Amino acid sequence: NSNVITVLGSTLPVELSAFTASYMENYTLIKWVTASETDVIGFNIYRSTEDVYDTSVKLNINHIQGQGTTTEPQYYEFQDIDQLVYETTYYYWLEVVNYCGSSNVYGSIEFTPETGQGGFENDFDSNLLMNQPNPFSSTTTINYAIKGMLKSEPVNISIYNTLGQLILTDVAKNGVCQFDASELPTGVYFYRLETGSYNQMNKMMVIK
């Protein structure tokens, strides 16, 4: 429920007065307001297509800087620029990181892109989604859709290491690829879906 904020943790490093997701022209705008903060280094935003925090993926690379300790209201926002799928419900969480290294999670809130909202990909456009889960240790799922192709038609998804070397090529069909990384060492990898009219690459992380 987007009107209910649940805190996962035993302490309250911030007093959160608002946490929302809304549609903008080319992205989803995540906003939050803190009424107070205590020893806060920063914030992280997580997203999933399931209302389960353990399945979520961190969206920001670096902490969104907090204000340490303050009793004044603070206003924050984050732009989720990933291409989302129409009529699919997404869940967002806000992680608060303290100076002592501990963290607390607020959420989830829901957001569902509606048909007619520009900037999002529908089921008939080309779209390579982020793999879920990510990071992962053995297997992950990659979803995609290619404009002008039936989902039953097979496509190749290529896996590369950080040196740009081709590790393997996996054949996917029906809009999904189940990728097995059990033989790969820990590290960052890239997966590319390429057709005659579409080419996109995303990043994934294997942790053993």
Image: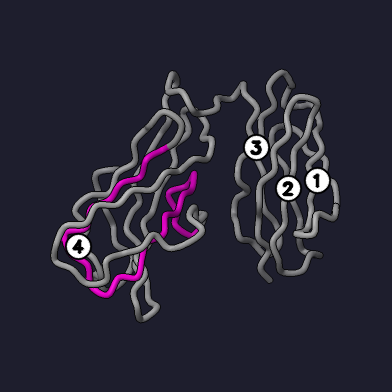
Res 191 label: 2
Near mark 1 (Cα within 10 A), the count class, few <14, some 14-19 or many ≥20, is some
- Quickly name the residue at label 1: 158
Secondary structure category for the residue under label 1: strand
Tell me the quarter of the picture where residue 65 sits. Answer: bottom left
Badge 4 vs badge 1, beta-carbon distance below 8 Å: no
Tell me the quarter of the picture where residue 37 sits. Answer: bottom left
Image location (x, y in percent) of residue 109: 34, 46
Q: Amino acid at mark 1?
A: Ser
Badge 2 vs badge 4, beta-carbon distance below 8 Å: no
Task: Point out the tag, 1 or 3, that comes first from the N-terminus.
Answer: 3
Q: Is residue 72 above or below residue 118?
A: below
- Quickly name the residue at label 3: 128
Image location (x, y in percent) of residue 47: 46, 49
Residue at the extreme bottom? 100
Residue at the extreme left? 71
Res 15 label: 4
Tell whether 196 sits left or right of 142: right
Magenta region: 28-54
Separation of residues labelled 3 and 2 (CA atoms): 10 Å
Is the N terminus in the top left, top right, bottom left or bottom right quadrant? Answer: top left
Badge 4 vs badge 3, beta-carbon distance below 8 Å: no
Image location (x, y in percent) of residue 167: 85, 55
Near mark 4 (Cα within 10 A), the count class, few <14, some 14-19 or many ≥20, is some
Task: Point out the tag, 3 or 2, that comes first from the N-terminus.
Answer: 3
